[in-house]
Amino acid sequence: MKLLDRARLALAVIVAKTVPPIIRKLGLGAGSVLPGEIARRLHPNLLALLCEQVREGVILIVGTNGKTTTSLLLRTILEENGAKITHNATGANLINGLITALLFDTNLLGKLNADYAILEVDENIFPLIVQPCQPTIILGLNLFRDQLDRYGEVDAISEKWQQAITPLPLTTTIILNADDPTLCYLGNNLPQNVLFFGLTESELYLEEIPHAVDSIYCPACGASLDYQGVYLSHLGDYDCPSCDFTKAKLDIYSPEWGQILVGIYNKYNTLAAALASQALNIPTSNIEKTIKTFRAAFGRAEELNVNGKSVRILLSKNPVGMNETIRTVNEIKQQGKAQATLLILNDRTPDGTDVSWIWDVDTEQLVSQGGTIIISGDRVYDLALRIQYSQETLNDAQLNLIIKEDLKEAVETALNHTAPDETLHILPTYSAMLEVRQLLTGRKIQ
């Protein structure tokens, strides 16, 4: 490495290790992005320089939902099997966040001591970082509509992914969710070794296809797909009546596996991490042991004890994600273990400024169970209107709707409406999740 490059790298390391503590001390955030932005200006090729130091390889985890939970599970499995991991654990998944995380784990000379780098990556910037990262494994979880003001439709994103992945070495392992027709079709058209995960459990089918679905048409010919059943949004068992496109053969048998946390989406996260671990030759018994003892990432079905009461935070940032959290909450309500639910809707940059997506959420399913619903957030009245229009499903159930503009008051009210033997479910958008954790624990991210 040239002397100038060494100097730039040393300066970038200093920035990465000194700026975050200052930012946190001033209460300006977690400091997970700004150091990477400064370092990138000092050394434009920094991401590639850091990734090439990883001994066994870089693992990129991409998709709309489930990145943080899957990343943490895979990291835990590998660490419990002796591997040294570098990981953007704060969830900062844009380029600057990736660089910040990698730099934080270097020594003062910029040397990165890691067997694997596990990087969860925003689906829109994924094509930009594939070449500099040169991943050993790419794990694609799903593609749903999310922040349409930024990303556009899922087929356009998939095309960009294919263009980015195709030039990679044929030795690269691609792991995709076959239950998602868009990703299944992507895998069929890649030259690399592709492994597929998905569900084989018809007893988990939804009664009907939700109206907020994205990819029910054949990606090969455009015909409407025939679904034998759906597990979540457009994810399910399907084939095309007009061409030979069908769900790919799976490389993991879901009934043989338990799952982490609650919800169908976490069964997908479990299978994804398990298949990636198997691809890295981790013994199945070791993978299963980790799954049984796994703890949630912050805000992803994370459970807290607050003043003797159980609280579960379920990040809800798009129609599919929120529909699944509602499904989970209702199952627990039907067991008599939940009464109050707190919904929080923000429209800040991390959330997406377009909140029209709430009209694609099946809030009627939540309202139909009755109980107490507290709502808050920057767009509390948009959410209140959505809940108001959902009340025709109440039937004989009784709904207690409480509107609180102040988030602290909303949390206190929700806790007051939660009995000691019940669980309070909080369904926040991303920025709201950070605020809620700050209120409940004194920390935004642990």
Image (tube, grey):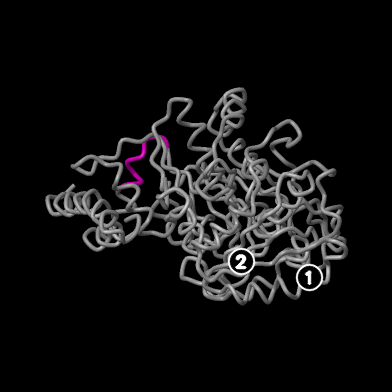
Quarter of the rendering containing residue 400: bottom right
Q: Residues within 10 Å of mark 2 (few under 14, many from 20)?
A: many
In the picture, measured across the screen, residue 90 lies left or right of residue 197, that is left
Residue ID at (84%, 53%): 229
Q: Residues within 10 Å of mark 1 (few under 14, many from 20)?
A: some
Q: Position of residue 24 (x, y in %)?
A: 29, 54
Mark 1 and mark 2 lie on one chain; the one further toward the N terminus is 2
Amino acid at the residue labelled 1: Gln
Residue ID at (19%, 50%): 14
Residue ID at (48%, 37%): 75
Q: Position of residue 352 (x, y in %)?
A: 52, 70
In the picture, measured across the screen, residue 327 lies left or right of residue 161, that is right
How many numbered circles does the render carry?
2
**In the image shown, does 358 or 202 lie closer to the viewer?**
358
Quarter of the rendering containing residue 438: bottom left
Q: Main secondary structure of the magenta part?
A: loop
Residue corresponding to mark 2: 375
Q: Is residue 352 above or below residue 106?
A: below
Q: Does the magenta portion include 406?
A: no
Residue corresponding to mark 1: 391
Element type at mark 2? strand
**In the image shown, does 304 or 163 lie closer to the viewer?**
304
- What is the span of residues highlighted in magenta in the rendered image? 50-56
Residue ID at (67%, 49%): 265
In the picture, measured across the screen, residue 199 lies left or right of residue 435, that is right
Amino acid at the residue labelled 2: Ile
Q: Does the magenta portion include 55?
A: yes
Quadrant where the image shows the C terminus:
top left
Q: Is residue 382 above or below residue 442?
A: below
**In the image shown, does 42 or 269 lie closer to the viewer?**
269
